[in-house]
Amino acid sequence: MTTPPLTLVLAQVTTLDPQCPQAEAVLVGGGRVLAVGTREDLRALAPRAEMRDHRDLLLTPGLCDAHTHLVAYGASLGQLDLQGVQSVAQVQSKLAERVARTQAGAWIEGSGFLLSEMGLAGYPTAADLDAVSPHHPVLLRSRDRHMVWVNSEALRRAGVTEATPDPEGGHIVHPLGCLQENAAGLVSALLPPPSEADWLAYARAGADDLAARGYVSTHTMAAESPDAPLALQTLAARGELPLRVWACLPHERLEAASELGLSRVPGGLFQWGGVKFFADGALGSRTAWLHAPGFTDGSGTGIALDSPELIVERGREALRLGLTPVTHAIGDRANTEVLNAYDQLRPEAEARGIRMRVEHAQHVRPADLPRFRGLVASVQPIHLQGDAAMIRDLLPQGEATSHAYRALRDAGAILAFGSDAPVSPPDLGANFAAATTRLGEDGLPLAPAEALSAEDVLWAHTRGAALSAGWDDEGWIVPGARAAFTLWDRLGGAAQALVL
């Protein structure tokens, strides 16, 4: 039997191991870290090892994006990109260009607009899109993906009129054009279904994009078709998945999964790990669930989605299967209610060694911060950049504890950082900048006392993300860990993945 080749990597090594925080070299074999230490010691230990000399670079544990919708992100790379548009006119210009090269009658999809960035006090209408696309049905997703903006042709095909009632958990904005939360499904259900080849292409595009940015793993958060994780599993089985993926199951499919015997099975490049709930919507769409008085523009207190009672009931079933309850909570009321539910689930979660997760934890009342002890706060600093101005305008009463990374960490939460792609691009530099400077896109700081160091950000993108997935073999460089690293010119700068 041939002995697997060994590799000696020379670099400026940051291990995140408290027992040996810095090193000069890492010895790797069989996809695992075998030893960490000085160049001389490891060369003596394995004199025939292949040498990779990266001594001019920083080597850290491999980066993880702890919150993506991976296949949807891959699909979005080929759609109309509305990130950063500053007016309805700019949307119309981009849409007109896409209409000119789209087959007659075919759907046009896009995403990335934000009401506040377009300078709108209200909501855009179908008529705004009809002006440039009267015959192609159009569906544009807001940046937070909790609202869609559609044209009259899309509404006509869906049979939505001024008399159509709001569906449960959703709202039809009048005059027609915007559909919030579950109301979006009235139109999105008509989109032509992708083929199996399409799903594989989307999965490959999303995974390849993250890998090219220096990521070695990601947590994908459901809110996608069942075909999305199936495509990722297919790539993993073929040996074509460049990332390790921890996937969430929508809670609506939990009963079927239980009947099939699905449970957490660590190992491999794809694994089921969480069960996803949505307590509310999002800030930009005015659907985040808030304590009174709510939004200062008078738009209310948001929309409550999955009830605390449902989270407790199905959370218990998830824990029984060894799966992690994972709940989206943006508004301060949503976070309060999720914490109330998790308090009931804590004994069983702790007995099973499972860290329950709150995704976003974006607006938290000071009294609720200590209740995050032992939980995962899976947050996306890049959101701070676009949200800062909105928070000052719409939620000034909660500004001091919005995106409260330092306070959450000090309360005993495990910080795990991600991007929420395709809601925001998986831009590592933006996450570092937002978390360390607290500056919004308007150049003004938001709760600057909540700033973290670059080392804190690295930990949340590596060890914190690994702990939140229950991975003890990732996020640090120790013997037995996965040989998946990220190389940097400087921390927070250009990054590239190195998986051996």
Image (cartoon, rainbow, N blue to C red):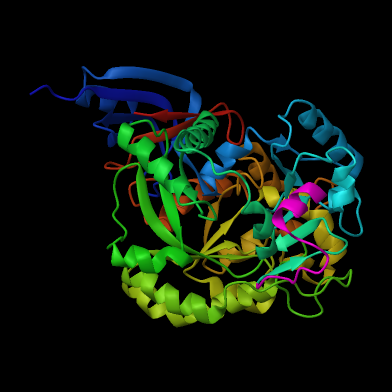
Percent coordinates x, y for residue 225 in the rendering: 50, 51
Residue at the spot x=73%, y=71% of the render? 166
Q: Residue at x 52, y 28 (%)?
A: 212
- Is residue 120 toward the left or the right of residue 326 in the image? right
Residue 400 point in image, percent of width and height: 76, 66
Query: Between residues 478 and 413, which one lies in front from this camera angle?
Result: 413
Residue drawn at the location 89% of the way across and 44% of the way down = 88
265 up-or-down from 485: above or below:
below
**As rendered, which of 333 and 237 lies closer to the eye?**
237
Query: What residue appears at the point 49 percent right and 32 percent down from the top-left corner?
Result: 201
Q: What stretch is highlighted in magenta?
A: 152-168
- Place residue 121 in its image quadrant: bottom right
- Asked whether, in this view, residue 69 is left or right of residue 273, the answer is right
Residue 476 appears in the picture as rendered: no
Which residue extends farthest left? 1
Q: In which quarter of the image is the N terminus?
A: top left
Q: In this view, does 179 lie above or below 63?
A: below
Residue 166 magenta-highlighted: yes
- Closer to the camera in the image, 302 or 400: 302
Residue 406 found in image quarter: bottom right
- Seen from the viewer's position, the closer of residues 1 and 409 is 1
Q: How many marks?
A: 0
Left/right placement of residue 270 relative to residue 329 reads left
Is residue 262 one of those drawn in magenta? no
Image position, residue 474 (x, y; %): 37, 45
At which x and y percent is residue 286? 78, 64
- The C terminus appears in which quarter of the rendering? top left
- Check the image and report above or below for 106 versus 286: above
Relative to 409, 244 lies left or right? left
Task: Let me know if residue 62 appears in the view.
Answer: yes
